[in-house]
Image (cartoon, rainbow, N blue to C red):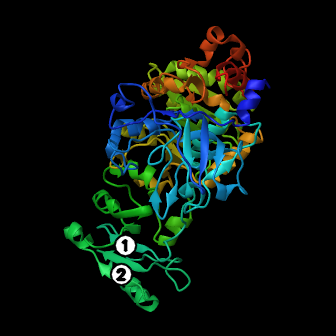
Amino acid sequence: MSQKLDTYKQAPQPGEHNRLWPLYGKGLENLGKDGQMIDIGLPRFGPDELLVRHDACGICFSDIKVINAGQEHPRIFKNMQEDPVVLGHEVSMTVIGVGENLRDQYKVGDRFIIQADIYDKGVNYAYGYMLQGGMSQYAVIDRRILAGDHGNYLLPVRPTTGYAESALAEPWACVIAAYELKYRTGLKAGGFTWVIGAASAKADYEISAGFAADSHPAKLALSNVPDAFAAKLVAQAQKLGIEVVNIDLANLEESMAGQPPVDDIIILGANADVIEAASPYLADFGIVALLADEPLPRPVQVDVGRVHYNRWTYVGGAGTDIAAAYSATPVRSELKPGGKAWFVGAGGPIGQMHVQRAVQIANSPATIVCSDLSLERLQVLQEMIGPDARAKGINFVCLGASDPGYAEQLAQLAGDGFDDVMVLAPAAVVVSQSAAYLADKGVMNIFAGLKRGTMATLDLSQVYLHDRRFIGHTASTIEDLRLMLSQTENGQLAPNRSVAAIGSLEAAKDGFDAAQKAKYPGKIVIFPQIKNFPLTALEDLRDKLPTVYAKLKNGREWTVEAEQEFLDLMLPEQA
């Protein structure tokens, strides 16, 4: 390691400058002042605070959503004109100043990454949204981060771990979290359950679990439930002290006024109109259980944005036991070992991560199909991940969605259906079309961030007749991030493989523009402390910085060694 890089790692005291990119409103034209960064001066920190240096920051498509939405973004609840957003939540940082009350816990040179979804007293202060993010050179870490609702949101990083790979643990944690989702296998204890009878409802329903003294809802709503079953439910509710209300479907909005969101909606019989009318009243993490033995007369409009963001899901069965509709086929989120998995929109940065993980896990699918509109991105997947897949005996196939024979090839590969379909393309029509290829007991994970209120047409008959499941995911927990960092530092997963382009803080605006236009088949990483360096694809380092290029793996993958060489060349002399 050079003297310059060794000095940098020791975290010397900076000057008085702190350059950053403020976002004052919707659109890239509102990024910076006159299209440039500003310098607000080095921030001061108090006795219970840390001053940190941002070392590397990945650009996420979530950043693009903030740029596109501005003040209307659901995580922004401040006046951006007066208090602009500084983006960047995929960030690695080094402590350069320690408040006097924290000196027994932290020291200059300590390295961390941050769980961006910070809550304090129930309020969301996400890093890179409400709190100044990584598109700046320095920031203050305060009590909200060090002692928030979930404890300390900083996670320590080993000195030998790369800056880019540790920063990219955050998006990787979101990927890992998609396969760790847990869903209830019964009614929510203490929750609100709503039972609705459709015209085709039967007379002999039962609920064999979840409605007894040891576990039961606190509130029960009934609508058009067959008389005999309704009488049983009411009698049991009275024994258990459960509040019972009647909901008039003909005057639904008025009847539901003042009612809390519903944790469990049980629909007896096949009725698409009822499903569509009732679903909007679901609580976060809510479940709709469908019990019927005949197909729905038509597909259903499903709010897939809320499947993604609010973790709604639909379960069901063809029998008459409500408990069995939940528990007979529990919702699976991990890829089926030895199964067939299809990654829709696989060529983007997050898609690459999903595919890389699918190949590297111990119990991989036997067949992995990757589709994308971009043939260039698919070629990168083939070159980067294909050899590893084939070495494990995986049937690894990349399909160009615009190719003339795409539909025929996909149908042939699907056969009786895919066990797992990961939707990484943010389009409702893609969700609808892909659902047709699910196998019995297959799972579709709607990972793409479709906004709430985005409706997709789905045949929910498949939920109760063939045990197909639709789930969704967003963000990650601090435990997900801790797991990903551990796997990174132990060599189990390699976030560095996701890096496609790099640049200095001056290049951040170009980086956001490139991410919005899907210019690169991987992640863009900004290094806020280096000298001016334009946004550059890794393959172009061959000519621009040949000694850095020489340290890439296979001429295309970022490495810790390449990063050290890059920083040695690009850090200012005084660092």
**Label ID, residue 195:** 1
Residue depicted at x 60% and y 45%: 51
Nearest to the eye among marks 1 and 2: give it.
1
Is residue 91 visible to us here?
A: yes
* Residue, disc 2: 230
Outermost residue to the right: 1
Outermost residue to the top: 543
Does residue 5 lie above or below 185 as drawn? above
- The earlier-in-sequence mark between 1 and 2 is 1
Does residue 4 lie above or below 319 as drawn? above
Q: Secondary structure at mark 1?
A: strand
Coordinates of residue 508 in the picture (x, y in percent): 49, 27
Coordinates of residue 563 in the picture (x, y in percent): 69, 25
Quarter of the rendering occupied by the C terminus? top right
Does residue 228 lie above or below 418 as drawn? below
Does residue 147 lie above or below 155 as drawn? below
Is 105 left, or right, of 246 in this rendering?
Answer: right
Is 270 left, or right, of 518 in this rendering?
Answer: left
Tell me the crowding category of disc 1: few under 14, some 14 to 19, or many 20 or more residues within 10 angstroms, Cα based. many
